[in-house]
Image (cartoon, grey):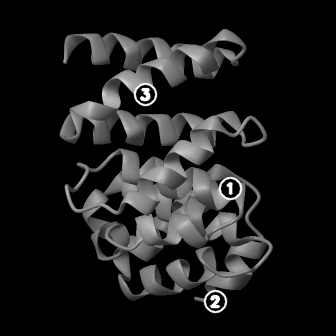
Amino acid sequence: MNLKELLTDIRSGKEARLIADAAIDQPEYLEELWRLATSDWDKAWRAAWVIDHMHQKNSNAVKGIVDRLPEAVLAVKKDGVLRHFLKIISEFPIKENISGEFIDRCFDIFESTSMPIAVRVHAMQILFEFSKVYPDLQNELALLIEHHMEEGSAGMKSRGKKILAALNKL
């Protein structure tokens, strides 16, 4: 299977899921998807999308790249790739040894009003999970969420309310 050609021709989520299914059955495809997702290819987000589908279907299928995701987030500039990588990271337990540079990047993404809402919301979720490990960040995070909810989209307000409620229970 030539993944790059298949990804170039994707027209629907159904097709992305079919490629993800094939990649789950052929674990060596994960490395090729990773290479494409972290490259400068203009359709890199499609490889990240397929990796996300693999994760949704079977989180064990992407275990080989999970530890590399935070470092990739530091380097990746494409919003679509960031969206899928942050989503996957947000669904795994936060490791205590995660880099401060990664957390700073999540704060930058969350606070960037030029970044798409979905990307910012996934960064906010990661920051919330991180604040469970490092409670000193909870007050700062709550203030930032409240600030961004004031003029935020429905998605930002919805996730913000849920995270604020969860922060109040900690």
Residue under the point 32% across and 26% down: 138
Label 3: few (<14), some or many (≥20) within 10 Å? many
Question: Which part of the image, by quadrant, shows the C terminus?
Answer: top left
Q: Quickly name the residue at label 1.
A: 80
On the image, the x and y values in percent for residue 92 come to 28, 50
27 and 45: which is toward the camera: 45
Query: Which amino acid, by three-letter code, is at mark 1?
Result: Gly
Mark in front: 3 vs 1: 3
Q: Quickly name the residue at label 3.
A: 141
Mark in front: 2 vs 3: 3
Query: Which amino acid, by three-letter code, is at mark 2?
Result: Asn
Q: Is residue 5 left or right of residue 167?
A: right
Q: Quickly name the residue at label 2.
A: 2
Q: Is residue 1 left or right of residue 127?
A: right
The answer to whether residue 65 is seen in the rendering is: yes
Q: Is residue 166 above or below residue 93?
A: above
